Amino acid sequence: MKRKMIGAAAAYMAGLFFASFFTDPALMIITAAVIAAALFAGKKYNFTIADHCIMAAFFGAAVLVFSIYTDLVYAPAVEFDGQNGSFRGKVISLQHYSGDNSSYVLNGNINGKTKAKLSFYVNSLDAEIGDTIELGNCKFEKPSKDYLFDSESYFKSDGIFLEISNAKDINRISSSKRSLKVIINDHRENMISDFHIALGKDSGDLLAGMVFGEKRGMERNIKTAVYRCGIGHILAVSGLHVSAAIFILMSILRLLRINKFISFALMECMIAFLITLANCPISAIRAAIMMNFMYAAGLFRRQNDTFNSLAGAVLLICILQPYVIYDQGFILSVVGTFGIGVFAPYMTKNIPSETTLGSLMKKSAVMLCTMICVFPFSLLYFDETSLISPITNVILVPLCSVSMMIGLLYAISGGIIDLLFIPKIINEFVLRFSDIVSRIRFTYFSGGSKTVVGGLMICMIITFLTAAIFRNRKYICGAAAFSAAFLFIASSAARIERNSHTTIAVLGKGNNAVAVVSRDNSADIIDISGHYRSAVYVRKYLAANGINCIDSVILTRKVQSGYSNYINELEFTDVNNWIIAGDTEIPLKSSNVTYFTNDITVHENRYSIKITDNNITVSSDNKEICFISDANAYKPSSGLTVLCGKAAKGDEMAVNTLDLSKNNNFEIVLSGSDSFTIRRL
């Protein structure tokens, strides 16, 4: 094995994945199959016994390290889940939100004994990084897994296993000195404020995302447009950002003829500053490690290799942070770098690039190869992914790079080098272009089924093994083409099967509920409880299932705020009709509006929706689903009854009854049989 670093990194990362789902038989079978294929590939490449021993050692070490970390660090912390106690810890990071709220990450001790890193969301305490927060009495809880966001996995990757709620006796102890991290954090906030002033809210948010990876203030519709356009990766600080900053620095140092060792030391300082400025994202750390390998190779007259550098960075990060495999940003950063730095150069090696047309074709091919690597993971982690990124990246990324580099110069110089009028022009064009492209249906794709996405991941593994075993571009293209064919055929089949039945998605949190009824390419939204977050749940569900047109949006409670929320969240969805409870007219952007005060029935092709007082009934295939939101409302004796709102509190669970205070975010499928099929989302 010539590249032992690659083999060691692959084996170690595989060991972490294996250890993370050790109890799942199906995934264990897949892992065993991958190991068998790796052994077969090793035989083909004449791996020695020593090579196999090295890979086995790193695989076993990963399983061991993961297990030890789980037993010694994770398990003692999560034992406090649901318990009350005291906590004292230092603020190691923070984020400010609207409404004078802040989220703090605290590193300290539970009850003065157990070490833990916790998340604490509270009205702003005016605390800074380095300050100490004491909580005399609080409740510890594991981060929740909600349909909107899997906060458990998100925090787990950063070593945060608990969050604090119901905190009392809060005491903040200010640090005696301002740390360098606090100064850099304040500098970032000042620069973001300058971006907003110079470029405006939307363009300023885009530049803040490009330079700092800061997406908190960005409108959800703008993020959707950027990601559908295929350039969402510019909002994550990674190799492009680090390379641009280091390129500027090293060019200046070369002009000044600075000693190469001093230049390397200055580069290290610049990298540390950039990572801290971006709030230490794992993608930036990975890029920084690879940048060190690249410049260190030149420093000591060694040959640099992208694949080896990537493997070394992955191995180092995984050793120091075993739970990093739960980090979506890390996985996407690794596969994206592999795609553009390893897979794309190999696949496009023989494409001529002497002419302008040839160069353009090669760049598009490089982007296509990168998309092939990232595509399965984008579908796995997000609701939809771009289909036109190979084209849009060639057009927009050079422009975005110019905008980003000017923003970096402004931030690094503290505003002395002010050329922000250029990013203003570029960003406004990018936003307008992205908005237009994102509204074209064929430019993006949603899997619509976890089974389809799972099958695509298997196809990706087959393609990877084909590349490793045969090393033949034709075979690799064939495997990739097979994967694409599987994706579109399986997705179409899943949509046809879905349209043949009436499906009622019940979304929300707790006893708040909104229902999405769909069949035969028809879909209706019934907002039952009027919660302000209902529209966000609907948006995610529609995106995940590729639903772009709604026949009717029915608002039954808090209609004024509800209409405003849905107008914003359904920006990219066509709504034919609005059906609104009450007789008070509200300013609407649509002319197809129906007001009702008592009863109303909405008839679609294969189902109907009837609203009577506090009951909402969906009928299809001689079956009824009744939603009850009042404790005193009539409960039908047949069909399926869903208790929500006030009716969900204190009611006994009966036959064919679902209580939303105990269950939520699921689909009810009405088929030809007498029973209902209920599946979790």
Image (cartoon, grey):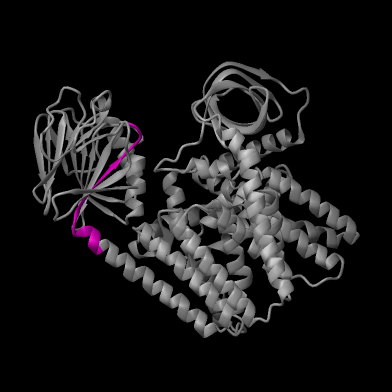
Q: Is residue 617 above or below residue 91?
A: below
Residue 207 visible in image:
yes
* Left or right of residue 239, residue 301 in this image: right
Q: Based on the picture, tell me whether residue 522 belongs to the magenta stretch.
A: no
Name the residue at 72% across, 62% down: 312
Q: Is residue 75 above or below residue 250?
A: above
98, 453: nearer the viewer: 453
Q: Is residue 600 above or below residue 432?
A: above
Name the residue at 79% across, 63% down: 295
Q: Position of residue 561 (x, y in %)?
A: 30, 31
Residue 3 visible in image:
no
Q: Is residue 283 above or below residue 36?
A: above
Range of magenta residues: 496-510
* Left or right of residue 269, residue 407 in this image: left
27, 678: nearer the viewer: 27
Q: Position of residue 35 (x, y in %)?
A: 57, 68
Locate the N terminus and report the quarter of the image it occupies.
Answer: bottom right
280, 242: nearer the viewer: 280
Q: Based on the picture, tell me whether residue 497 belongs to the magenta stretch.
A: yes
Q: Position of residue 231 (x, y in %)?
A: 51, 59
* Left or right of residue 13, residue 259 in this image: right
11, 400: nearer the viewer: 11
Name the residue at 57% across, 48% down: 209
Q: Position of residue 2 (x, y in %)?
A: 73, 76
